[in-house]
Amino acid sequence: MGASFVPIVVFTVLWGVVGIVCPIFAPKGPNRGIIQVVLMLTAATCWLFWLCAYMAQMNPLIGPRLDNETLIWIAHTWGNPIANGTK
Amino acid sequence: MTLCQLFLQSEAAYACVSELGELGLVQFRDLNPDVNAFQRKFVNEVRRCDEMERKLRYLEKEIKRDGIPMLEIPGECPEAPQPREMIDLEATFEKLENELREVNQNAEALKRNYLELTELKHILRKTQVFFDEMADPSREEEQVTLLGEEGLMAGGQALKLGFVAGVILRERIPAFERMLWRACRGNVFLRQAEIDSPLEDPSSSDQVYKSVFIIFFQGDQLKTRVKKICEGFRATLYPCPEAPADRREMAMGVMTRIEDLNTVLGQTQDHRHRVLVAAAKNIKNWFVKVRKIKAIYHTLNLFNLDVTQKCLIAECWVPALDMETIQLALRRGTERSGSSVPPILNRMETAEEPPTYNRNNKFTSAFQHLIYAYGVATYREVNPAPYTIITFPFLFAVMFGDLGHGALIAIFGFWMCYKEKPLQAKKIDSEIWNIFFGGRYIILLMGLFSMYTGLIYNDIFSKSLNIFGSSWRSNYRNDTLADNKLLQLNPDSEDYLQYPYPFGIDPVWQLAESNKIIFMNAYKMKISIIIGVFHMLFGVCMSLWNHIYFKRRISIYVEFIPQIVFLTLLFFYMVLLMFIKWTSYGPTPGKLGSDDPDVIRTSAYCAPSILITFINMMLFKTDPNTRPQCDDVMYAGQMGLQKMFVVVALLCVPIMLFGKPYFIMREQKQQARSQPLGAGPEGAEGAQAENGAAAGAPAEAPHGAHSHEEISEVFIHQAIHTIEYVLGSVSHTASYLRLWALSLAHAQLAEVAWNMLLRKGLMSMGFQGGIFLYVVFAGWAAISVSILVLMEGLSAFLHTLRLHWVEFQSKFYAGEGYLFQPFSFEVILDSAGQAEE
């Protein structure tokens, strides 16, 4: 599995705090229920959306087809200098 | 919500209704529905209020005409005045109206006079010009006659020429001249000169341009003819003396009279202005008071007068939680009116369905309106609005997904919410603005969520951000690069770093113009279905809530459980397959590009199509294996499990179809059996009375409600529901693919706008390139805002609304209630204020 441990933990914990911990501290008053619902739904939807984007790219089935000029540029800027010869 | 009866003493009635109107928590029912509006008890008072309002509107028109600002009401709205104050108000308005009408009439008469004098002045001046032109310098001024020497000498005798002088509208002069020429056969002589300054028409207060003319003719016949033509063209004729001395005298007289008139006119205008300014201070106040009085009397008209003629009876819907507040308000009203008898608020039992009342604050009310636009919730049914607060902006954002455009929307929404109070106070007229302003919280949330999904889609104005470093590298060597225009990176190699971009879509995809869409389509279609299935499951779970609250235990077993099982076993299973495909198939780190059959079995080559798998599952079909290195299945036991899922799901359908009618039939038989034979109808009535006793949550409602329903009706009803649900689950799942479609359209439009406009501007060189970029940026910004933000935004809004109304709410929402519309001065004043504008 091509998954890296750190981002999963970070984002799950982040949205977990927003969705599970924060509602406990919602201010008391007539709006407490609404605030809790809003926090929980926000956390659930945002976490699900991030998770799908992450999982869709973990094990990619195809790669991007790039222009040769673009390839030269990304090799230069993303730290992969071009070697001589054919592939 | 309780139905209450209110007994008010006649003297206290006015004050109590006034207090209740301020409170805005009571909905009155019309107890005299068949009484004509003109026969109601308080029709005279309502008529008087109408009269007062008419006078106030006249005053307002005059104030607006003069451009005097009307002061807004400082602080609180004034309370409805007592009935005896009404007479004072009427007298004041009457006096003001009469005064104003008198002043206006006087002013008009004065202006007419002024106009005549001014025209005369111009005539005298211009004819002087005619004479000056004719003047022979050798002659003395006094002796110059109109025509001069030539005329005298030509005929050998003095020709007696008559003339008329007058003023006519400048536009009419050509036609006037032509008419004169034709009618008088060219025997009259017209001279005209334009008046430079425009004159004010007294009745319409328009500024018009006029010209002075003089017509010379000989003889009486021509004189009559000329006079008639002048009349026809509505030219005003003035007597103009022939001799210059007379003319000068007349001119001086006219000037003095004009001066006097000016002074008088000025004073009249001042007086009018003063009256209006004094009225303008209070006019908003008066409007509010009059409208409140009218509202109170309209409400009093709904009441019934009881036998003793001393007491008014009202029926009203009252939220059960607010009984205390209402009692306090009634007590205050009684004290104010000085009556001794306290009002009585009595609860009534009823089988009628109460109106639906959902308490909202300014934030939630916008979302509540979105739900109500489809249908008001049935009394006490679960309200989807609190969840809509987040799911609506989220689904919008999935379709809109652009950080830049989302930021624009969020800034707009934030500005409207931040400047809420000043913007509300302005009372802007435009309906489009009011729609946007009413939905300011929705817009703010949509913008914020769009920024989040924009970050995940990695799309800001169709460009990507590389915050964390891409997970793809280029390993091609320079000869390959020189020979090939397009090259693809292979994930099963060093090209992919074997861990994904941590937040969102990798920025490399934005650079891959040729096959970006293939990847994004697969990704976006899957997330659309995932989000859709979760949304629908959420909807079905809400129906469980409804069943529990209304104590429909049978429905839980024969409706909710089969529905959940059907949806889960088929569509949630498809969602699980998607997650399995995402995790099981792909490059194996450490064994990149290997030939090992075990590795190949889990590589990209063997990844199956989810859609084909699902279709084969439903049709109990297996495709022939075209790839011998690959397994038929994604996990062990897939075929058997799938067959079982389909069978169980299909079994749910007859349960949904026949379950509920069967139980209803059984209950009806039990009822018929448990009552003695002769008391059949009474037994049914008894059951009805039992049901009528519940004003709150109806107990065993289907029990009593269906006792008189035909069995065939029940079956048909249930069949419709089942077909709707089963077919709906397929069609609604596919309907969620609009999330993919709209986000694709948005991304492509943004890309086209960038490539065709801004890129050309950014690539232009030199000084003229700078100017070109300046111009092109304006075009790109205009297209971005008008098409991408406004049009796409509206489109995504509409589709999200549809998804909520149809796909989500059809799983649980009945929406057959009616709204609680309390008697509230705030509501009445707002709507009156809007109708006025």
Image: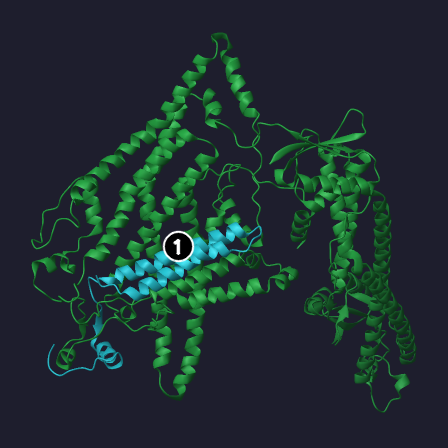
Secondary structure of the residue carrying tag 1 is helix
Q: Residues within 10 Å of mark 1 (few under 14, many from 20)?
A: some
Tell whether B753 sits left or right of B436.
left
Residue B594 in view here: yes
Work out whether B117 lies above or below B669.
below
User: In percent of the image, x 44 and y 71: which residue is there?
Assistant: B781
**Looking at this rendering, what residue extends furthest in the top direction?**
B678
**According to the colouring, which chain is green?**
B
Three-letter code for the amino acid on which mark 1 is drawn: Ala
Picture quadrant of residue B525: bottom left
The spot of residue B506 in percent (x, y) is: 29, 68
Circle 1 chain: A
Tell whether B625 sits left or right of B138.
left
> Label 1, on which residue?
A44
Residue B737 in view here: no
The spot of residue B466 in percent (x, y) is: 33, 73
Work out whether B107 lies above or below B568.
below
User: In percent of the image, x 22 and y 57: which residue is there?
Assistant: B583
According to the rendering, which colour does chain A have?
cyan
The spot of residue B811 in percent (x, y) is: 40, 40
User: In percent of the image, x 86 and y 78: which residue is there?
Assistant: B157
The spot of residue B636 in percent (x, y) is: 15, 47
The colouring scheme, among rainbow, by chain, secondary structure or one colour, is by chain
Tell whether B197 sits left or right of B364.
right
Which of B112/B748 is in front?
Answer: B748
Which of B760/B101 is in front?
Answer: B760
Picture quadrant of residue B216: bottom right
Which image quadrant: the C terminus of chain B?
A: bottom right
Which of B321/B575 is in front?
Answer: B321
